[in-house]
Image: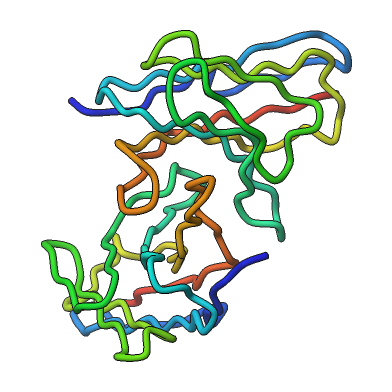
Amino acid sequence: DAKTTQPPSMDCAEGRAANLPCNHSTISGNEYVYWYRQIHSQGPQYIIHGLKNNETNEMASLIITEDRKSSTLILPHATLRDTAVYYCIVRDNQGGKLIFGQGTELSVKP
Amino acid sequence: EAQVTQNPRYLITVTGKKLTVTCSQNMNHEYMSWYRQDPGLGLRQIYYSMNVEVTDKGDVPEGYKVSRKEKRNFPLILESPSPNQTSLYFCASSRGTTRDTQYFGPGTRLTVL
């Protein structure tokens, strides 16, 4: 079963920040939070991941709450090419699998 | 270029005709995995491999086989495909497990008639 809950869809204006929320209230202490995105039916693409601290890379920022029960992915300046399904995932400690939920379909509009 | 490759990308076959989908990675990753993606069900893990000669079942292994004779290759074998295996398949690899990024291949769209 998916360990994360995300809104099914969101809209964002081009050039604005896109803030995608995720709840992972059952996350265990050593499980990482990962964000991937999937454009059309291409292979999922890694965006960012974190354990406790906030993280930033060239694609996005990840804000994790202090209790680790939720996080937010921030795309600082969304473009039309950021239109995709975004998955918030916790990675299983045993089998290493990514437990995908339904994701958030982000539509970036001109 | 670091990548995961899959072949074929598209395949239409008939029930019962054995097929193999190949997966290869050039990143010297130890961990490899197969997923299938179906509408409304998301991505589900079929099999995974922690290292050469080590494979284990994921969530939906029925009807599939895998092998890991070399580090770079992780083929998915359907001995007797059935229509319910019509799906989009992804291979993925990572250096390790819990804290390492998984890199996905481009996908194989399989139709079983």
Q: Where residue A98 sits: x, y (%)?
A: 50, 53
Left or right of B29 on screen, residue B44: right
- Name the residue located 67 percent from the left edge and 16 percent from the top edge: B77
Q: Is residue B13 above or below residue A41?
A: above
Residue, far bottom:
A66
Left or right of B93 on screen, residue B8: right
* Frontmost residue, A76 versus B72: B72
* Frontmost residue, A3 versus B2: A3
| Quadrant where the image shows the N terminus of chain A | bottom right
Q: Is residue A12 above or below residue A50?
A: below
| Quadrant where the image shows the C terminus of chain A | bottom left
When asked about the image quadrant of residue A63, the answer is: bottom left
- Name the residue located 55 percent from the left edge and 16 percent from the top edge: B75
- Name the residue located 82 percent from the left edge and 9 percent from the top edge: B17
- Name the residue located 54 percent from the left edge and 79 percent from the top edge: A26
When asked about the image quadrant of residue B78, the answer is: top right
Q: Is residue A72 above or below residue B68?
A: below
Q: Where residue B20 sits: x, y (%)?
A: 64, 12
Left or right of A95 on screen, residue B58: right
Q: Where residue A38 sits: x, y (%)?
A: 44, 54
Q: Where residue B22 sits: x, y (%)?
A: 52, 15
